Structures are given as structure tokens and as C-alpha cells.
Image (cartoon, helix red, strand yellow):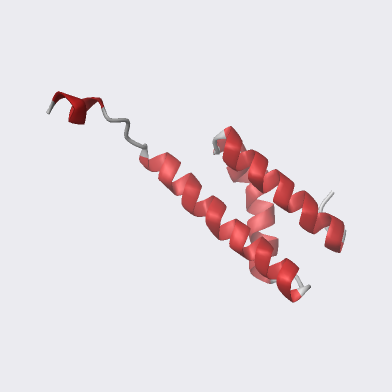
């Protein structure tokens, strides 16, 4: 019983960050696979750089930064 109380839990903001990261990675993967950008990805990109990036844990931020840079290299649309 005592161990149950000491078990680490995730904050809801961490879970939202994970869900956001996964959804953006799926959009990025789809763009790479289809070799075309979508309006959803454009919106997600803008939101990421303006609002979301600074709220994510470092590991998620690093993963998304790298993914955005990769796609930018393919499409040359992110600076």
C-alpha cells in the first residue's frame, strides 16, 4: 500500500504534451510519405513555434525540432 502512494504519476499537462507531439509527428510523417504538405501541418507548425514549443518537456521539444528540420529540408518551407 505504501508503494502505491510513492509511484510516480504523470501530470495532465505531460499527457497533453505527449498527445500533441504524437499528432504532430504523424502529420510530419504523412507529409514525408506523401511528399506533400497539408493545411493541417501548416497550422500545427505555426502553433508549435508560436505557442507550444516552450511548454513541452525537452525530450518532446527536441524530437519535434528535429522532425520539423527534416521536413523543412525536404520542402524548404521552415526557416
- Tell me: residue 28, above or below residue 3: below
In the rendering, at what x and y percent does residue 44 appear? 63, 58
In the rendering, at what x and y percent does residue 13 appear? 42, 41
Residue 75 placement, left or right of 27: right
In the rendering, at what x and y percent does residue 31 appear? 71, 68
Please identify the quarter of the rendering in which residue 72 is found.
Answer: bottom right
- Tell me: residue 27, above or below residue 66: below
Q: Nearer the viewer, residue 7 or 26?
A: 7
Image quarter of the N terminus: top left
In the rendering, at what x and y percent does residue 30 appear? 66, 69
At 73% from the left and 52% from the top, the residue drawn is: 68
Q: Nearer the viewer, residue 42 or 23?
A: 23
Please identify the quarter of the rendering in which residue 25 is found.
Answer: bottom right
At 77% from the left and 73% from the top, the residue drawn is: 36
At 66% from the left and 39% from the top, the residue drawn is: 62
Q: Nearer the viewer, residue 79 or 4?
A: 4
At 37% from the left and 37% from the top, the residue drawn is: 11
Residue 1 placement, left or right of 54: left
Residue 75 placement, left or right of 15: right
Amino acid at each position: 500500500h505504501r508503494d502505491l502512494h510513492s509511484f510516480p504519476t504523470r501530470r495532465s499537462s505531460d499527457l497533453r504534451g505527449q498527445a500533441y507531439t504524437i499528432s504532430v509527428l504523424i502529420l510530419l510523417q504523412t507529409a514525408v510519405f506523401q511528399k506533400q504538405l497539408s493545411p493541417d501541418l501548416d497550422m500545427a507548425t505555426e502553433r508549435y513555434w508560436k505557442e507550444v514549443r516552450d511548454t513541452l518537456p525537452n525530450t518532446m521539444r527536441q524530437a519535434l525540432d528535429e522532425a520539423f528540420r527534416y521536413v523543412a529540408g525536404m520542402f524548404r518551407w521552415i526557416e
